[in-house]
Amino acid sequence: MAERTREQVDNRARHPRIAAPHVRSSDSTSDVPSEILARFLHALADPTRLRILEHLSRDGELHVSALVERLGQPQGRVSAHLSCLRTCGFVRVRQDGKFRYYALADHRIPALLALARELARPNAAAIASCIIATRHDPPEET
C-alpha cells in the first residue's frame, strides 16, 4: 500500500468527512478508480460549490468575504464548501497576512463547467425529475 502524503493526512484532520476508503477500480486500465472519480464529481454536486467555482472563473482570485457577499451565505458555510473544493483540487488558497484568497487550481475548470452545462441542457427536465440523483448515499449493490 502506498504511503499517505503529509498533505493527505493533514486534509483528513481538517476535513473529518474524508475517510480512508477501500478503493477498487471497475476498470483495471484506469489510473483513477471509479470510487475516487465519483467523489471528485460529487464535489461538484452542490449548487453553492458550483457557484463558488463560477465566481472564481469569472472574477479570478477572491477573498472569502467577497465570496460570502456574492453568495449571500454565512462565512462558516462558505468556508466549509471552500475546504471541500480545496481538498478535491478545484481551488487553491493564498494567505496574505490574516486574509485568505481563493482561486481556481486548474485553468481547465471553466471548460469542465461549460461542458457539464452543455451535456445537461438537453436532459434538464429529466435530470430535475431524477430522484436517485438527489440522494446523498450511494445505492446499495445488488
Image (tube, grey):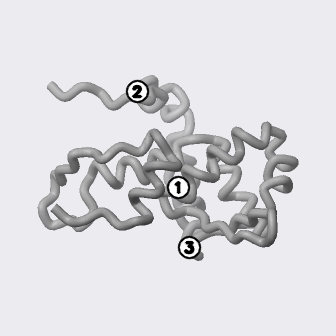
* Residue that carries the numbered disc 2 in the rendered image: 132
Give the SS element for disc 3: loop
* Residue that carries the numbered disc 1 in the rendered image: 116
Q: Residue at x 18, y 54 (%)?
A: 25
Q: Residue at x 70, y 58 (%)?
A: 54
Give the SS element for disc 2: loop
* Residue that carries the numbered disc 3 in the rendered image: 106
Question: In the picture, which quadrant includes the C terminus?
Answer: top left
Q: Residue at x 48, y 28 (%)?
A: 134
Question: In the picture, which quadrant includes the N terminus?
Answer: bottom left
Q: Residue at x 50, y 41 (%)?
A: 123
Numbered tag placed on residue 32 in the rendering:
none
Q: Position of residue 59 (x, y in %)?
A: 79, 67
Q: Earlier in the sequence, mark 1 or mark 3?
A: 3
Q: Earlier in the sequence, mark 3 or mark 2?
A: 3
Q: Nearer the viewer, residue 1 or 48?
A: 1
101 left or right of 45 in image: right
Q: Residues within 10 Å of mark 3 (few under 14, many from 20)?
A: few
> Comparing marks 3 and 2, which lies closer to the viewer?
3
C-alpha gap between disc 1 and disc 3: 16 Å
Locate residue 128: give its quadrant.
top right
Residue extending farthest to the bottom is: 107
Vertical order, 129 against 88 (above or below): above
Q: Position of residue 71 (x, y in %)?
A: 80, 45
Residue type highlighted by circle 2: Ile
Residue type highlighted by circle 1: Ala
Residue type highlighted by circle 3: Asp
